[in-house]
Amino acid sequence: MPPSIKSSIVVTVIVVLACLVAGLFFYELKPVNANDSALTVFEIKQGDGFRAVADHLYGDGLVRSPKAFDLFALATGRALALKPGLYRLDAAMSTSQILDVLSGGGAGKATVTIPEGSNIYAIDAILSAALIIHPGDLIAFHQDGQLEGKLFPDTYQFYTNADVSDVVQEFIDDFNIKALPLLNADPKNSQRDLILASILEKEVPDPGDQQVVAGILLKRLAAGMPLDVDATVCYAKLLENPSPTSSCSSLSALDFKIDSPYNTYLYRGLPPGPIGNPGVSAITAAIDPVSSPYWYYLSDPKTGKTIFAKTLDEQDQNRVKYLESN
């Protein structure tokens, strides 16, 4: 066989092999499953190298080949541009699309709404679900116990993968603008009113009724009576077993025996701090209570309406009518 023919065959084989390798390489850069758009929260931790990231992506079923990811990341100059943080990825994304996200540092903003009365555990869950902070960051930041009550419920826009201190500062700034001027109407009692507002927010939905209940609770405090507020027992229970999804739809007899200063059935006076983060309506009610002949109240579970009573006998009758009959 003439040398020229042999050379042509060798070149042809090399070209074919190169095409096959290239085809396989680009195939491995395609989405793992173009029909699966279920989002996965993927985390790059501080100190993770791009090879570790590739292995984690492969383990989570987000790329076809960690080696192909490595080569493509190096070839496109993005291997060293991967940024720590939380990201939303799915198996319908190509390697190139995944690299675009991971090298962008999750840049962007997320809009979240914090409902009135939310406690710090629920707010931590809302923020981390939106990839604004890591789960538990807000709770860890709260170790000094000074945040509950001051994470003002509102709609916010935060950067994703934000520093928790920046997030907290935005909450505090909003609190200082919208809540603090109201509380400073009576600066000597501002903390008392904030705690009272947090109770009203959890106990009573109607703004007018909130003012009446504020008057009842202040009257009980002045008389040295226990406040006997179920919402404070719920918070005491939450502190024993913190959970963002903790429900307080019903309390057991054991719950009312929880030895906590937040249990206003066992300890007289207000709890030591807010049990959630009240909005303007509840704060206004706390600083502008309405006097009434009532000493007791309960919520109708069917309508949410607050039912008032002047005497304990009348309260017991309301319990039978509205609670025990349901």
Image (tube, rainbow, N blue to C red):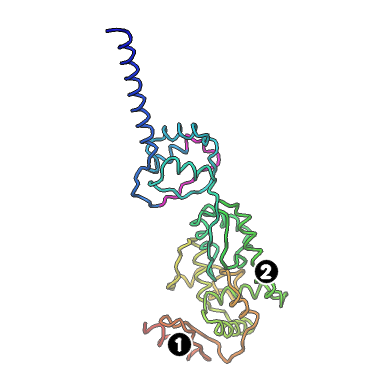
Question: Does 46 appear in magenta?
Answer: yes
Q: Is residue 40 left or right of residue 49?
A: left
* Quarter occupied by residue 216: bottom right
The amino acid marked with disc number 1 is Asp
Q: Position of residue 167 (x, y in %)?
A: 61, 57
Give 170 or 202, whichever is nearer the viewer. Answer: 170
Q: Earlier in the sequence, mark 2 or mark 1?
A: 2
Residue at the outermost left position: 1
Q: Residue at x 41, y 45 (%)?
A: 93
Which percent across, then down, holds residue 24?
Answer: 35, 32
* Image x and y of residue 209, in percent: 54, 84
Q: Any magenta on residue 33?
A: no
The residue drawn where x is 61% and y is 73% is: 195
Distance CA(mark 2)–CA(mark 1): 43 Å
Name the foreground residue: 44 vs 237.
Answer: 44
Q: Which residue is mark 2?
A: 177
- Nearest the eye: 53 or 228: 53
Which-is-in-front pick, marks 2 and 1?
2
Answer with left or right where residue 14 lies relative to residue 258: left
As helix, strand or loop, the secondary structure at mark 1 comes to: helix
Q: Which residue is mark 1?
A: 316
Q: Which residues are magenta?
A: 39-52
Q: Position of residue 185 (x, y in %)?
A: 71, 77
Image vertical order of residue 280 relative to residue 133, above or below: below
Q: What kind of residue is marked 2?
A: Ile
For image coordinates 51% across by 73% down, the residue present is 231
**Depicted 122 relative to depicted 53: above or below:** below
- Where the C terminus falls, by quadrant? bottom left
| Residue 304 lies in quadrant | bottom left
